Image: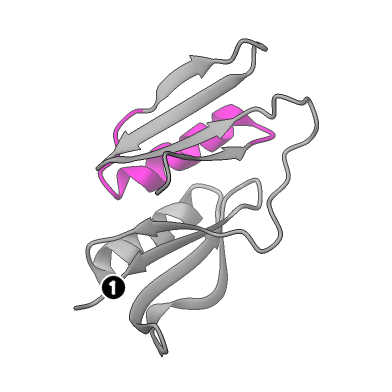
Amino acid sequence: MLNHVMLGSSDIERSKRFYDAVLGTLGAGEPVRNLAPSGHVRYFYRHDGSNFAITEPIDGAAAAPGNGATIGFKCHSPEQVHQFHDTALANGGTSIENPPGLREGNMGALYLAYVRDPDGNKLCAIYRPR
């Protein structure tokens, strides 16, 4: 359904360092650097059929996280969820909500970890046990 997800950053190189490390835990390699026609820098990460990007806000306003927005990253094991979480913390992210772990609910069992990136965007590492 989705082609890509893009988040704004107030410090694009700081965000690149953060996402290089965090998305590296999922197997993503170096992003493609793109210069928008406006002159703003963007980085595109491509992995496993998905696209994720970070950008300097093209309108020139400050980057701001969406209230109620969460970007979920698919993990292949509980260990990968922890690695994502711990790598985020080691690279300027903040742990939020409950510690990483299994949650049972009406959507079934989910192994989750929530963090905020250095710009305050909410990220979720998620593994769905079979």
Q: In this picture, is 39 found above or below 62?
A: above
Residue type pointed to by label 1? Arg
* 84 left or right, relative to 130: right
Q: Nearer the viewer, residue 101 or 8?
A: 8
- Which region of the structure is painted magenta? 9-30
Q: In this picture, is 39 found above or below 23?
A: above
| Residue hosting label 1 | 128
Q: Check disc 1 and report its element: helix, strand or loop.
A: loop
Q: Please report the residue visible at 49 percent of the width from the left and 41 percent of the height from the top.
A: 18
Q: Please report the residue visible at 42 percent of the width from the left and 61 percent of the height from the top.
A: 85
Q: Please report the residue visible at 39 percent of the width from the left and 83 percent of the height from the top.
A: 107
Which quadrant holds residue 60?
top right
Percent across and percent down for residue 121 are 61, 52
Which quadrant holds residue 52?
top left
Q: Residues within 10 Å of mark 1 (few under 14, many from 20)?
A: some
Q: Nearer the viewer, residue 128 or 119?
A: 128
Q: Nearer the viewer, residue 54 or 14?
A: 54
Q: Quadrant of the C terminus?
A: bottom left
Q: In this picture, is 68 found above or below 2?
A: below
Percent across and percent down for residue 12 are 59, 29
Q: Please report the residue visible at 39 percent of the width from the left and 42 percent of the height from the top.
A: 21
* 23 left or right, relative to 95: left
Q: In this picture, is 115 found above or below 12?
A: below
